[in-house]
Image (spheres, rainbow, N blue to C red):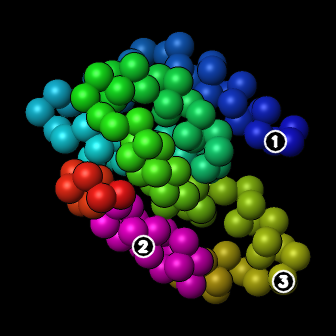
Amino acid sequence: MASLCIIIGFGSVVKNTRGFEACVALLLNPSRNVYASAALSTAVVSGITASASGGIQIACSTFANTWLQSANPAILNRICSIASCSLDSLPHSGRIHSTFEICKVDLKQGYKYVFVVSVIIRAVVTVIAVILGNMGIC
């Protein structure tokens, strides 16, 4: 719980920087589909924070008002929840390092398996969710 609070606090500080404002402008491209924008934004923020829960909290507090103007809240919730789990396990994630340390596995040796299961497969599922969301099915 403490680590989540630290991540959200870190995100609150980062949200007040010029660099974050530039990222927001880039991610909130008005010509992009709202569900694709939500998936991409949530995944990127989760990747930066290395936390799905922290990433979804920061992304939604930053972008939700814009997304909700043209999206179904239930579909948006599902897409953001799925997308937040795609990039949260990049190599800088403390969770990954802790798991490998407990299992006595070197990052170089074991990360390729985590990458396939935790990043690639979840990214594919996110794309499927965006497609289904645009069809009104998700």
Instruction: Please name the residue shown 66% across and 56% down the image.
Output: 93
Residue 18 is situated, as x and y percent measured from the top left of the image, at 42, 15
Residue 18 shown left or right of residue 97 in the figure: left
| Residue type pointed to by label 1 | Ser
The residue that mark 2 highlights is 120
2 and 3 marks in contact (CB < 8 Å): no
Q: From the viewer's perspective, is residue 105 above or below residue 99?
A: below
Q: Which residues are magenta?
A: 113-129
Q: Is residue 28 visible?
A: no
2 and 1 marks in contact (CB < 8 Å): no
Q: Secondary structure at mark 1?
A: helix
Q: From the viewer's perspective, is residue 87 above or below residue 106?
A: above
In the figure, residue 73 lies in which quadrant?
Answer: top left
Residue 94 shown left or right of residue 87 in the figure: right
Residue 99 is situated, as x and y percent measured from the top left of the image, at 79, 72
The residue that mark 1 highlights is 3
Instruction: Please name the residue shown 30% across and 58% down the image.
Output: 137
